[in-house]
Image (tube, grey):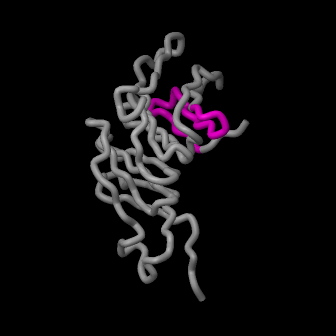
Amino acid sequence: TYSSPIAVSADNRLVWVVNPSDNSVSVIRSDTYTRLTKITVGAEPQSIALTPDNLSAFVANAAGDSVTIIDVEDTNYATFAAPVDTSVGLNGELVTGAEPWDIVCSPDGKRVFVANSAQDTITVISTGFRSIIGHIDLRNSLANDPDRSRHFQPRGLAVTGDNTKLYVTRFLSFTKS
């Protein structure tokens, strides 16, 4: 009934849309605006990121506390195929943290970063190994000074073009007068 953030393939041929209300991702042709497929993912997907080579899609599932990994096997419109990689995690889902809200892939395609909004962490995933390689605790970081007892609630992510910095925005500032 509604969709959320989208991603466009590097060649501008495919538009990927998460559908939180029915736990799916739709893949749409950009030239005719017709849906090629609908892929079932984890509970309440909120955002999606494509690798620069357009061969993988990573979906942040807010209510599932997970990321679903989709393999793009065939981008030909007539034979399009993009199944969930069920060999990863539990049926294709990596458990990340509480309420993964945003997801972004580094420009070099080596890392995926997931903003776990209800846990104040960032999960780091290796795209090559398709596994979690670490977590960043934002609540206890300098980014949360001067009051580290407040929730950071990361919601927005961006990686610089040279892959050296990750920018994170918080949902609410909880500033005090």
Q: Is residue 174 magenta?
A: no
Check the image and report above or below for 58 versus 167: above
Q: Is residue 144 above or below residue 100?
A: below
| Residue 95, position as x, y percentages in the image | 41, 44
Task: Identify the magenta region.
Answer: 5-24
Quarter-of-image position of residue 167: bottom left
On the question of residue 116 being in view, the answer is: yes
Q: Give the left or right position of residue 55, taking residue 171 as reference.
A: left
> Would residue 24 appear left or right of 142 to someone viewing this image?
right
The residue most toward the front is 90
Considering depth in this image, is 166 or 145 the residue closer to the camera?
A: 145
Q: In this view of the protein, which residue sits in the foreground, 61 or 49? A: 61
Measuring 45% from the left and 26% from the top, which residue is drawn there?
84
Residue 85 to residue 159: above or below = above
**Residue 162, image x, y percentages:** 30, 53
User: What quarter of the picture does the N terminus occupy?
Assistant: top right
In reply to whether residue 22 is colored magenta, the answer given is yes
Residue 105: image location, x then y, percent: 39, 44
Between 6 and 22, which is closer to the camera in this rendering?
A: 22
Percent coordinates x, y for residue 43 in the rendering: 56, 39
Residue furthest out toward the top = 78
Q: Which residue is pictured at 40% across the width and 31% down the height? A: 56
* 168 displayed left or right of 173: left
From this view, report whether residue 39 is shown above or below residue 139.
above
Name the residue at 37% across, 72% down: 140
**Residue 133 relative to residue 14: left or right:** left
Q: Residue at x 57, y 80 (%)?
A: 175
Q: Is residue 108 visible?
A: no
Quadrant of the rendered image containing residue 138: bottom left
**Quadrant of the snapshot with the C terminus:** bottom right
